[in-house]
Amino acid sequence: EAEEAEEAEEAEEELQEEPQEELQEEQEEQLQAAEAEEATKEEPPIINHSSADFLSPDTTNAPPLVSPTLADVDDDIEVDVASAAPAATESSAYFALHHHYEPQQLHLAFAGHDHGMSLSWVQFYPPAGELAHSSPALPPLVEYAACDGSFTHRENAITRSYRVGDWQGEIYHVLMQPLQSDQLYVYRIIDGDLTTQWMPFYSKRRPSINKAHPFTAAVYGDLSTSSNAARTLQQIQLQNWKIAQSQRQSLPCVQNLSSSTPAGGLDMILHLGDLGYSRAFGKKWDIAFEWFGREKQQTWDLFGHMISPLSSTIPYMVAPGNHETGKYDFDFIPYSSRFNMPLALNLESGLPERKLYYSYDWGPVHIVVLNSEQSVAPLSEQATWFEKDLRQNQKREQTTWTVVAFHRPIYSSDQDSGSDLTLRAQLEPLLVQYSVDVFFTGHDHSYERTYPVAFDQVLVDQSVVSLATRDQYVDPVGPVHLRIGTGGIQLGVAWQRRPLWSAVRLQQFGFVMWRVFPHNHTMSFEFVSSVDGSTLDQFTVVKQRRVPNAQFFALPEDRLSNSGGQFTMRLFGALLVMALLLIVYAVYRQRRSEPLRRGASSSLPLVMKSPAYYA
């Protein structure tokens, strides 16, 4: 009995120890699992250093790189009617853009005639329930600082988003001002618990006489999201690196940046319309209506992703083209929502308004960007604003040059579209009257430059152009038209018969490097190949005097004016001429019928008269 009692006690003790051991083992397993999960868990992308910490040379806490690079873009991606719909769901590039929950598609833009800078970006937020960065309760903000540590400021972002299908991106804009001219700044985006890396940019430069540092810009149109477009952007990046290394000294704060694009290279990029071609295109150039909504926006996203390595540190100025219009893209809504271009002054109230046309100063150059898809007929809103802007600029001494950017060409010998004669008749009188120097266009997918030309007449003589090389225009009395529809979309295949005004025309992918030298009043233009970076064409324009071109044309005043008064006088004159013609015709009819009436009223029998009588 004693042994049985002892065995019962031991069994009871074992029964009591087993749950404790199991509980202890379970707790140990949970603890190990928690430790393993903690070890593999990523730290949230939070950067708690201030701009002063960043600006110190010994800073080692590098912010995470979130700006996309061209290496992320699939070299074979092209929007095609047959393949674009599957690509929208299967392509890693498209998928990554919409599952990249950090600020993306960053691009800067000049804010207008002052020294401010606009920053825009797109951001996607994960669906509710995902363990990722969630949509913040407050709008994101941008912190920007001078590189020398003398200035730090924060500005809240505003949103101009839209909804198409199930596209749910947020588009933010921030105006960074006031900024000192020709100074290096850095900025970063703070959105809830996420902070991006610092990115550098230079504020707008003042006109100077520095011979070694001209104002430099890359200019092109008709880019798309093709592999040819990627090559164009890569060549522009190479040009930007060369300029930055030769012209700017490396500052301590720049050495701490991990940006793929250096500061101090190009001053500006000017895109002449037809940006990413969100309209689906293929061999038949038709619209794929079955995937009309979201996928069009994904093309916009891919375009923003491709240009971001450049546009995040270089002002990227855009003009609207026919592939951003309401016919193809919801009445300019994506274009005007994603790009924050300078405002245009209202002619009645004098207050700035958001339009699809605008102007700004870039060093000694006054640049006017017009909307080719909006009327420029006499007395139209855009034409009236355009004339007033040119007239006011002609009175200013700050600018030496006047340049206009417009998508559709008014001088083109490409077989695709050719010269738009209606637009030429509407715009050319103003271009000549207000001494426009260069007229940039795209649309036709080839490169062409003209001699100085006006009203279809080539203005070339020994004093105007170097006849030996025909690559230097000195004091031209008409604008030079430069068409650069060679950014990346498929090239044209045929030319018209060569007009007298066509100086050089090429069917090769490329862009123009535009340099302005204020010290000797010279602008140079170099057409660079997107394939190998070679120079395919180059010329210069020299201005030794500043006299309105209209004085050098023996043209009637009504051809050189687009004002309402002149238009009314022309209309009155046309009506007067028509009235005189009607009177003359009525007198003629009366004289023809008079002999017959005399014969009918006579009592004598009618006698056949000879034709000489009626004559």
Image (spheres, rainbow, N blue to C red):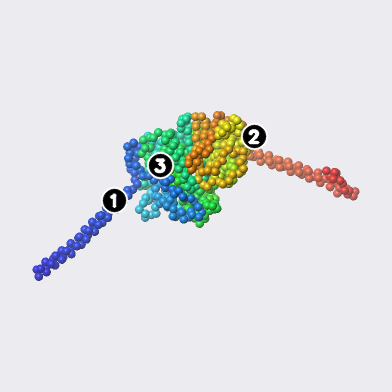
Image quarter in which the N terminus is found: bottom left
Q: Is residue 557 rendered to the left or right of residue 600? A: left
Tag 3 residue: 260
3 or 1: mark nearer the eye: 3
Amino acid on which the number 1 mark rests in the picture: Ala
How far apart marks 3 and 1 lie (CA) works out to 31 Å
* Quadrant in which residue 594 is drawn: top right
Q: Are marks 3 and 1 in contact (CB under 8 Å)?
A: no
Pinpoint residue 308: horizontal percent, then vertical percent.
44, 44
Tag 1 residue: 39
1 or 2: mark nearer the eye: 1
Q: Is residue 38 rendered to the left or right of residue 71? A: left
What residue sits 28% from the left and 53% below the top?
36
Q: Determine whether the residue tagged by mark 1 lies in a helix, strand or loop.
A: helix
Circle 1 crowding by C-alpha within 10 Å: few under 14, some 14–19, many from 20: few
Residue 168: in sight, yes or no?
no
Q: Which of marks 1 and 2 is nearer the N terminus?
A: 1
Q: Determine whether the residue tagged by mark 3 lies in a helix, strand or loop.
A: loop
- Residue at the outermost left position: 2
Question: Which of these two is toward me, 484 or 335?
Answer: 484
How far apart marks 1 and 2 lie (CA) works out to 81 Å
- Residue at the outermost right position: 604
What residue sits 39% from the left and 54% below the top?
127
What residue sits 48% from the left and 48% below the top?
226
Q: Determine whether the residue tagged by mark 2 lies in a helix, strand or loop.
A: loop
Q: Residue 555 shows which numbered tag?
A: 2
Amino acid on which the number 3 mark rests in the picture: Ser
